[in-house]
Amino acid sequence: MYSDVFSLTRILLLFTLLLGAATAARAEDGYDLWLRYPPLEKDIRDQYRPQLQRLVIPKSEQSPTLKAIERELVRGVGGLLERRPVIEERISDDGFVLVATPQSSRDVRAQNFPLKSLGEEGYLIRATTIRGHKGTVVTANSERGLLYGSFHLLRLLQTRSALEGVNIETRPQIGLRVLNHWDNLDRSVERGYAGQSIWDWWNLPDILDRRYIDYARANAAIGVNGTVLNNVNASADSLTPRYLAKAAALADVFRPYGIRVYLSARFSAPVEIGGLDTADPKSPAVQRWWNEKAEEIYRYIPDFGGFLVKANSEGQPGPQDYGRNHAEGANLLARALKPHGGVVMWRAFVYQQDNPEDRAKQAYSDFVPLDGQFDDNVIVQVKNGPIDFQPREPFHPMFGAMPKTPLMMEFQITKEYLGFASHLAYLGPMYEEVLRADTFAAGPGSTVAKVIDGSLHGHRLTGIAGVANIGSDRDWSGSTFNQANWYVFGRMAWDPRLGAEEVARDWLKITFSDNPVLLETGLDMMLASRQAVVDYMTPLGLAHLMATGHHYGPGPWVSDLARPEWNPAYYHRADKYGIGFDRTREGSNAVAQYASAVAARFASRNDVGDDLLLWFHHLPWDHPMPSGRDLWQELVHRYDRGVAAAQALQNQWQSLEPLIDPERFDKTARLLAVQAREAKWWRDASIAYFQSVSKRELPRGSAKPEHSLAYYQQLQFPWAPGH
Ligand code: GCW
């Protein structure tokens, strides 16, 4: 079966290659992501051409990865330089690119490159002279390393970086770099705003869409090495033989690209598809069921990565249904996977119905006491902030607080709370803000990045997940700029110390061009965009003010839902006197979940900073702000500032029209118009509401909301996507 699928894949690849030739002539519809290889500017092409004339990739017949590398380099170099490199067996002249491990090439062996520290996935790209010939070597300890190195080489060309004297050594700082698809078996995508699921579950495994290969290429190019195919709100059917065969077909396509497949496992699967009457982790029958299930899965997918589990969260089943804790639940699955080398990614996104404790505190309360009780192939997956992917949250207090347990980061790439696919919000600055946040867990410098790359507490199992923004839309992510969020996730997963700006610059060059005006304006737009969204939706540390359920648009007035923490009013606590959630000792004392230096800063009105002020403090409307305004005026000011920023994005983009192809220009322009309109809607509705509570006059110069509060309150969006 194995080799069959491989030959199928091969046919598919050939097909892709043929189609690829046609793509070049096609309009710029965004399909190519960062795998765009249109001809570079002539002077740059002329510089590169002599350096990239021949490709030397010693390979064995069986290696699909090396074939993928060769195809990509031929396509990439051929496209960018408008000249196909010749394929050679051995270095014969100057201008070679040698892609080989020390095992596959005597020339590489002879150079004695320092590969030890590069691990299984790192690589080295170096300008060198071999037997008198000048060229470039891409080398690594494994073919996967060569794959990543080859994509990096292409990136050097795409960003017009010099090859002369090039000397790059890099390895990923985080082991598991995975996308989480919240994709359902009916092809709907929870919180998906870019069409349907790209997984055509119904027609798998017989029909293999060519998108699967392009998906794998795009991910390999940024170093993503795993994908969880199905929604964490999982159907147990994903674990039935019928669906395992489908997942296996995808795993076969992804394997040459270094991408492993994982599945979300429903905790109650032994009952639902196993015919048992319990899913209790202490039941021997349940344990046996999971052990056998794991064996079965590995028969389909020999390199299966493992399970992602959402348990006892928002109605999902879990160990607590049987009086067991999260560690007991996670270990049940971990023990089934252990003999096969799989891991369990156990989510910490939990909050309980009827638990009166501040929602921001509940995950910590549930998990931190379990530190040290998880098996060694369990990694706990923690969202970046303690509530839920809000435009801005403080870092999650669990980071740094469980030294004996590997913790992985969960970012959301899809913009559930940041304007869906239509708003431009480059998430690089948000990821950077979280990764660089100092937990002080082991003194100053204990950044979140160091927690998740394992260096702070000496963990070898490390990971980072991004909830994908990928769908069946032609441009994959619903807009060109949304692609940048997938891109920056991958780049920062490889190196969490990278800056958002640096990645944005690369992305702009690859996606559009290296025109200096375009770069400057594009960077400005991208770097300002997330703060703009914060300002017009949830300024000053406010959170969760979105409308109910679908989370589209403002709903700060909502206060009548069954569970308190579903209500925006629970989060902002605005009344006649003031606004904000008191999380100091006088309030919920959530600050105490942070290391003392951080707790002291968050607990201080003066030191916490404007960005998180109302997250941690309930303050009177006339509280004086550093700007000289009072809190009410500052709030209105932030909303105004957000609207102005959204308008600025629109104007800046207009100025780029001559520099951008019509198709991508036009779609982006239309989306930016939507954003500007919706920013104003957010601002007007929020101010109308907060004014009805605060009874304060609008500051001078600040426009009255366009409509009455009642108008905004009656708007309904029953068909909003992703819900
Ligand atoms: O952000 C919330 C979403 C839910 C999601 C949940 C989670 C998959 O609104 O749609 O469910 O978080 O992360 O589990």
Image (tube, rainbow, N blue to C red):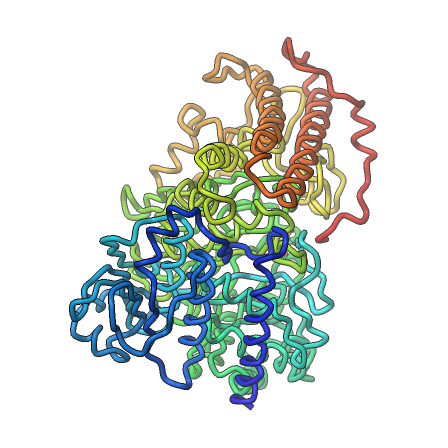
Give the residue drawn at x 42%, y 75%: 65
Q: Name the residue nearer the viewer: 608 or 14.
A: 14
Q: Is residue 693 left or right of residue 488?
A: right
Please tell me in which quarter of the rendered image ligand 1 is found: bottom right
Q: Name the residue nearer the viewer: 687 or 243.
A: 243
* Image quadrant occupied by the N terminus: bottom right
Q: In the rendered view, tell whether residue 623 sits above or below residue 670.
A: above
Q: In x, y percent, where is residue 536?
A: 62, 30
Q: Is residue 459 left or right of residue 321?
A: left
Residue 189 lies in quadrant: bottom right
Q: In the rendered view, tell whether residue 713 sits above or below residue 503.
A: above
Give the residue drawn at x 75%, y 43%: 561
Q: In x, y percent, where is residue 719?
A: 80, 49
Q: In x, y percent, where is residue 325?
A: 52, 66
Give the residue drawn at x 21%, y 78%: 106
Q: Is residue 204 left or right of residue 20?
A: right
Q: Name the residue nearer the viewer: 229 or 269.
A: 229
Give the residue drawn at x 80%, y 23%: 708
Q: Is residue 288 visible to the viewer in this orientation of the structure?
A: no
Q: How many marks?
A: 0
Residue 133 lies in quadrant: bottom left
Q: In x, y percent, where is residue 326?
A: 51, 65
